[in-house]
Structures are given as structure tokens and as C-alpha cells.
Amino acid sequence: MSKEIGITVKKSEDFSEWYTQVVIKAQLTDYAPVKGLIVLRPYGYSIWEFLKSSIDQKLKATGHENGFLPVLIPESLLSKETTHFAGFTPEVFWVTHSGDTEIGDRLALRPTSETLAYSMYSKWIKSWRDLPLKINFWNTALRAEIKSTKPFLRTSEFLWQEGHTVHTTKEEAEEEVMTILDIYRKTVEEELAIPVIVGKKSEKEKFVGAVYTTTMESIMPDGKALQMGTSHFLGQNFSKPFDVKFLDKQNVETFAWQTSWGVSWRLIGALIMVHGDDKGLVLPPRVAPIQAVIVPIYSSDSDKDAVLKKANEIGSSLSQRNLRVHVDSRNEFTPGYKFNDWEMKGVPLRVEIGPKDLAKSKVVLVRRDSLKKSDRSFDQIEDGIVKALDEIQADLYEKAKKILSERTKNIVNLDQFKKEIEKGMFVYSPWCGDQKCEETIKEDTGADIRVIPFDVKVSNAPCIVCGSPSKTEAVFARGY
RNA sequence: GGGACCGUAGUCUAGCUUGGUUAUGAUGCUAGCCUGGGGUGCUAGAGGUCGCCGGUUCAAUUCCGGCCGGUCCCA
């Protein structure tokens, strides 16, 4: 019976089912009535809020401002940059009517906002003095997912931010691309405790319309790679069709250089997959809506009063140190129920306090990640919790890093390559740079080039597919 | 892109093959008690358009078709 209340499958045995149960049962999200759409519940949304605020602060600190764009984009505008349009059109939702009246120039529910943003930018930018223009938008994007959908990872509407910047020079724009990628990497590694590999996408995998795409990739416990965020150098590919130009200091009309970039709530999906276990979610302390939960334990009424009093006392002193703490004083549940409940929701630390503890002036501290228990005397609680939270954050990252490195292989032989891909590995292999080889390997093994890391070794080793001298190494894996 | 499966109370589910009086059980929920250091026990109660639309039939949760929604596997 008890097994049916919590997560009923093991992460290692039925990963998909495990994931679905965790997102629903930990009350992060629920399915909406329309296919492929989900609702964020407060517990899930509040994780997004921490992520959002972390990224937002870093963007503001590097000179970005927030704006707002409408959700509808006329087809005539969306189709102005042709490769971009061709790339997105299969998954665009169209609004064709207002009331009963058919709309002549049908309206797209934004799959992304480059076209809309740049048609506005062209009005706003006249002089080199107007640049750089660096605006970020917190909104949602809509991309129709016909087949398999999965909460946070693949949904037809998703929460994200999209940044769109305009610069006077190529160099400045390229620097911006890297600044953003670095903000993303830091956020993911430091807040979500997920290590990533940063680099470029191949020509085949880059953002449609971009000159090149930089990306951060990570591998999930089921062996599939997940794109965690991208930052694109657009060159002048959009500034020309959208007429984003300025008068430079020499009074010469010049097309601007642009970037765009985004991360979505997919990061929450990654967080769940990377850190969760058979009992449910495991949240890194920095993004946990509740960092420590205090569970009072009592039997008699007199115990109850004394225990609750102390629990509340501890709770408020922790709050004063800016810790997100919750005292679970629900009377209708036993301590055992509460333990399981908060473990499923991934709260990093549990503080147990009962009559036995009161007698000894201490509490029991339990870590969610290791489930290890230890005692803290009353005067050590605050420091003890701060320290334990830091340790959990660091340990989660180290654990994930170890898994990433265990899942990473260097392979030069094609047979070996296929075996490792089959096992769900991140495979570093030499590649000639030819898109045909990329397509061949995709057809044969299901793996694509996830990323060409910045720090990769360059050698003349034969291409893993065709055997001709390679231009670079690339990271291959099957992806989400 | 190809294939398989599923939809009955908040949740999980029996019944469907072989249509027939009041749709089964558990859990959760409400009230009262009990209990409390790992999903506690008792009593009473509320909770259902059997996903939706249509067809077959005297009669459909059950058979057939379409639609909507969900899950999994393969590429």
C-alpha cells in the first residue's frame, strides 16, 4: 500500500515512467486539457522563479534590460528571413480567424521572436549611438509537438527567456554570444548543480538563420543528451532582411551585427533527471523552494506543545538567516508520512525534533541526497544547516560531474563507436566536418553531433565515418 | 516518420471476452476518536455524464467507428 502512494518504479529500471511520476507526484506540474500543454503548479513555478531570478540578475549586471513582445506575429513578417521561416513553419500554430472573420495575413503564435523583435529594432536604431541594444524577454514560445511530448522537455508551449541584441561590430556581437553562454553555464553549474559541455553546434544542428550556434549540453541518466541552452551569432543574416542598420561614426549606413539566445524550463526537466532518485525529487539547495523542513514529533499533548514551540522557534531563527524553511505542523499525518512526503518533493534537509531531542537539547538533521542522519545541538543548528546546504549543493555537483565523466568516451573506431552510442555514452570522435558523414551516422546509430567543444583537441585522425583526415573532434550522442 | 497500448470517484483499479436490477476494491477526502522517531488503527459520511460524439441493439461502462487526451517502443 505504502508503495503506491509514492514513486512506484525505480529510476534505473523504468526511467520514463519514473520521470512522469516524479513531475506529477511532486506537484511540479499537471497536464492541461490540450495535447502537449502543461500547467505549472506553485511548487514547480517557484523553482522556475529561482532560475529566472538568477539569470535575470546576471543579465542586468551585464547591461541587459527586459522588454515585452506580443504573442502574435503576422506570417508576412515571420517569413521575411526564408531559411528561418522554413525551419519553423512545420511547428507553427496559426491564428486564422478573429471571431468569425478570416484573417488575411494569418498570425503565428510565436515560435520565437527574432522577426518581430528585429522589425521593431529597425525602427528604433538610427545611429551608432543607439548601440549596443541588449533586450531580453521573459515569455513563452509555442511550437506544435505532434508526436511524443514530455513535461518540461518537450511541450508545445514552454516558458523561456529570449534575448536579442544588436551591435556595431562583428567582434562585439561574438563577444556577447560568449558572455551569455557563460552566464548560462554558470547558472546551470552553480545553481542546478549540473555540469555541461560548452561548444558550437554543427552546421546541420545550428539555429535556423544563425551564422553559428553555441550550446551547452549535458547527458541524462538514461544516456540521452539534453541541450540545456543556446546562444546564437546571427551575423547580418537578420539585419539585412529586417533593415536593422545604423549610421556609423563616418556617416556610413551599416547593417548591424546581432545575437539571440535562450534557455527554457527544460532546465527543470534536466534538474529532475540528473539529481532525482527512487524516492522522488532531489533539489539542489539554491533552487529549492523549501531548503529545510522541520518535522515535529510528539505523542502526548504536553510533548506536543513543547516540541511545536521549539520547532517554531528554530523555524523563525532560520528564516531570519534568509533560509527558506517550513515547519510541518500538520496534525493529521504521522512523522513517517511527512518524511516520505518531503523526500518525494526533494527538500534538501529535514530537521527532526521530538521529546528525546528536547531532553538532549539537540535535533536530528537528515540530508535528502544521502539520507544520512546526524545530530546538531541547539546552538549549532543554524550554522549546521547553512553548512549542510552548502555541502549538499557541492556534493550534488560532484556526483553529477562524476557521472558525466563516466559517460564520456573517446572513440576512433566505428564499431566501438556504435557500441558506446548504444550504451548511451557521450562519444568524442574525430570528424571530417562533412555534413554527409553526420547524416550517415545519424541514420546508422541515431546519434547526432551534440556539440563541438571549444576545448577540443584538433588532430588529423581519420574521420569516424569516412576515414578522411578530420578537422575536429565532435561529441556524438542520442538526444532528447 | 513507423508501431503498440491505455482512458471507470482526487489517485490507482475490478467489471468488458460472453451487453441486462444498486459499477468493485483500495487509497485519498470530510467528521469524531486513536496514534505518532519511516506511509498507524477504528467508526461514520460525501464523492461517478464509466473521456467525447455517433452507430448497432428492446437495452451499451461492455460491441463497432470517429474524435479528444495520455503512455511506451523503434527511427
Image (cartoon, coloured by chain):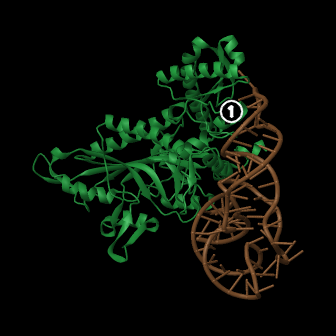
Chain colours: A green, B brown
Crowding near the residue tagged with mark 1, few <14, some 14–19, many ≥20 C-alpha atoms within 10 Å: some
Chain designation of label 1:
A
Could you say which is closer to the camera, residue A169 or residue A471?
A: A169
Mark 1 element type: helix
Q: Quadrant of residue A148?
A: bottom right
Residue A416 in view in this figure: no
- From the viewer's perspective, tell me whether residue A113 is left or right of residue A248: right
Q: Residue B52: x and y, percent?
A: 61, 72
Q: Quadrant of residue A454?
A: top left
Could you say which is closer to the camera, residue A236 or residue B35?
A: B35
- From the viewer's perspective, tell me whether residue A326 is left or right of residue A71: right
Q: Residue at x 53, y 44 (%)?
A: A44
- Can you say whether A184 is above or below A36 in the image? above
- From the viewer's perspective, tell me whether residue B9 is left or right of residue A473: right
Q: Residue A466: x and y, percent?
A: 56, 57
Could you say which is closer to the camera, residue A249 or residue A114?
A: A114
Hey, what amino acid is under mark 1? Phe
**Residue furthest left as drawn:** A251
* Residue at numbered disc 1: A339
Residue A362 in view in this figure: yes
Q: Residue A237: x and y, percent?
A: 30, 58
Q: Residue at x 62, y 23 (%)?
A: A308
Q: Residue A334: x and y, percent?
A: 72, 32
Q: Could you tell me which quadrant the N terminus of chain A lies in?
A: top right
Could you say which is closer to the camera, residue A109 or residue A454?
A: A109
